[in-house]
Image (cartoon, helix red, strand yellow):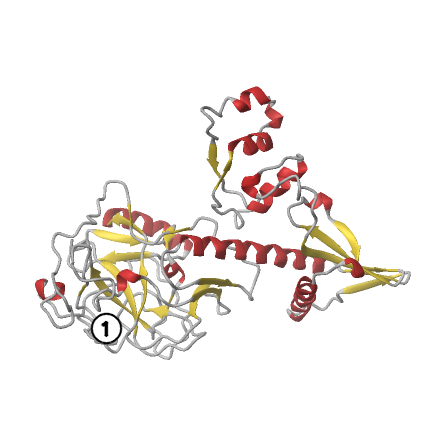
Amino acid sequence: MVSDNEALPCGEFSGLCMLKIYFPMRKINEAKISAVFQNGKAWCVPCLVSLDTLQELCRKEKLTCKSIGITKRNLNNYEVEYLCDYKVVKGVEYYLVKWKGWPDSTNTWEPLWNLRCPQLLQQFSDDKNTYLSQGRKRKAITSKDNNKSLQPAVAEYIVQKARQRIALQRWQDYLNRRKNHKGMIFVENTVDLEGPPSDFYYINEYRPAPGITLNSEATFGCSCTNCFFEKCCPAEAGVVLAYNKNRQIKIQPGTPIYECNSRCRCGPDCPNRIVQKGTQYSLCIFRTSNGCGWGVKTLVKIKRMSFVMEYVGEVITSEEAERRGQLYDNKGITYLFDLDYESDEFTVDAARYGNVSHFVNHSCDPNLQVFSVFIDNLDTRLPRIALFSTRTIKAGEELTFDYQMKGSGELSSDSIDYSPARKRVRTQCKCGAETCRGYLN
């Protein structure tokens, strides 16, 4: 099948196709297969393997399935997916071709003149040069009897990069199908062979753990015609409007944000509806070169004091957070964020369920600041967590926030603690800032 890094939710497919592919060895006959179709309705199953793998299985079994794009017309089509190897025989250059939608057993050596894939040829050359630039002393090509062949280690690396590229593209497509905000999500890894995380599911809002109820209905709303000038939701909550006319945050850290909600009569263009509209910027999840794993960078300029993203995940009790925290400490990871605006009953765990914020790294000199937000759910024990820019952020710059939220010059030492849940093992900080404290906790 596929590796953990390649296994991503990809939708539902025809039960007939899936049964024929996966159960021939169990001798399930056509009558039994047909039994799952009643009243003209097809049975569908959730699929956790890639579309390419399903296509390979279909072609191997000589099956057609419109749901995954295999028809009688294209059943025997051949398209180059990536190039696996290289050799020169009697002066003729050959490439070993992996055909898209076909198993590895059907790979064939093709002369260069047969190939019409300049981009894949360039990627092959770039991957070879990347391998050689990483301090390898061996030559890429060996010669024998006037024939040439690629070193096995080089070919293996090129195949790994090609498969990684496909897996990351598939993951990027998955993320953009799942997100509900304007900004696009891109994925990039030019550092190592790491693929997508194997156990991460993209969500757009809090996911309550069993036994926890999130009230998503507002109890009151404003009737303003212009929320910027009238007594609006923030005033009802005893605070000031959080935004200025440019939709930038103007309040100090530690002050809550109360946005207009679903009961308010104001429209979607209300100046007090910012966080609820989601990320407006195109962001890139990228592999860092400083040992911090994945990170997030902006692909466009972000003005100071602008909303960037929410921190979402699974909402759990503080007791459960303590238990999970011990497990995470042993792995050297931290995704627990205490919702301690007013009490310390709940924690957000973004380890398995989260959005782009899951990949945002810590810095002792961050460019993002945390604020508590209340929109439809006004329960002060369960604020939404929003990240705003503290300064102008250039395109291509990594986004970071302080996991302890004590490193910003705008915060005093006795300010509200928005830090992730307490940790028992000290984790070394790699942010590289001049003001680095040395540890994340």
Q: Is 369 placed left or right of 413 in the picture?
A: right
Q: Residue at x 21, y 44 (%)?
A: 213
Whether residue 293 can be seen here: no
* Image coords of residue 337 (percent x, y): 28, 58
From the viewer's side, name the closer residue of 60 and 77: 77
Question: Mark 1, residues whose alpha carbon is within 10 Å: few (<14), some, or many (≥20)?
Answer: many
* Image coords of residue 419 (percent x, y): 27, 63
Return the residue found at the far top: 31
From the viewer's side, name the closer residue of 318 and 367: 367
Q: Residue at x 58, y 32 (%)?
A: 22
Label 1 sits on residue: 249
* Image coords of residue 363 (percent x, y): 36, 71
Quarter-wise, where is residue 246 in the image?
bottom left
In the rendered view of the protein, which quadrant contains the N terminus? top right
Label 1 is placed on what type of residue? Ile
Whether residue 164 can be seen here: yes
From the viewer's side, name the closer residue of 227 and 305: 227
* Image coords of residue 345 (percent x, y): 19, 51
Helix, strand or loop for disc 1: loop
